[in-house]
Image (cartoon, helix red, strand yellow):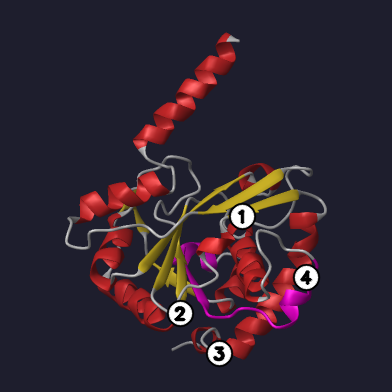
Amino acid sequence: MHLAERLKHIKIVRAIVYSVLGFITYPGLTIFNRIKIEGTENIKNLPRHNVLFVSNHQTYFADVITFIHIFCAVKWRKANRLGLPYYLLFPFTNLYFVAAEETMNGSAISRLFKLAGALTVKRTWRANGQEVRRGLDPSDTRKIKEALDRSWVITFPQGTTKPFAPGRKGTAFIIKHNQPIVIPVVINGFWRAFTKKGLTFKKKGSLLSIRFKEPMVIDYSAGIDEILEQVMDAIEQSKKYMLKGKHHWMTALDK
């Protein structure tokens, strides 16, 4: 196991990384932009392990660091707000997040995020210059299961920042076989405020919204496709929501 892999499992290392990243990013979330948080009452009494957060995805890093801020704030009994970032002095560290291996090896900021608890997975490979989609391989599935056995895990079922991209069956497989508490999360505004691959601003004054929904009611005996469809609907990235978005856009053009 590489040194970075060992270090990210040490809570004091993650605490230091969260504090550093948290203090650096706090102004971008609350001063240069506006943040709206909803539904933290759905996460404050969760067990310490086997909890899976499923979310849509808009940037590589700003989404994740915002989750960390919120979980730390909730630990300090803040409800639907961040307030002053003293919560970063003793952060919530019972957390991992799933990220594509190729993303986490690309830059200094990505390597720092790796220490923050990234569970790197091989989600795609290239053939003749084309990106080919595939599911999680067994070693990646085992890695996520081990993380769920002792902590919370964040995953982005689409595996891409492209809106309404189809979900990947690996997420449904993990849900079916580990039977975690699944909390759907819907985020918006991050694509407008931040660059996709970094934490630099693209547009200041943006509204960043994060909504934690109630735990999903899942029939774990259902098929993979059925579970995946339920997840995609819960994070509002299913075909139903895509058609609804197109309808609102066409209505706006008619006005």
The relative height of residue 219 versus residue 244 in the rendered view (above or below) is: below
- State which tag comes first along the sequence, 4 or 3: 3
Q: Left or right of 181: which side holds 211?
A: right
Circles 4 and 3: CB distance less than 8 Å?
A: no
In terms of image quadrants, where is residue 23?
Answer: bottom right
Q: Which residue is mark 1?
A: 197
Return the mark for residue 66: none
Label 3, secondary structure: give it: loop
Return the mark for residue 151: 2
Q: Which residue is mark 4?
A: 85
Circles 2 and 3: CB distance less than 8 Å?
A: no
Q: Which residue is mark 3?
A: 10
Residue 216 visible in the current orientation: yes
Q: How many numbered dots are placed on residues in this image?
A: 4
Between the residue at mark 4 and the residue at mark 3, the CA separation in whole angstroms equals: 23 Å
Amino acid marked by disc 3: Ile
Circles 4 and 1: CB distance less than 8 Å?
A: no
Badge nearest the viewer, 4 or 3: 4
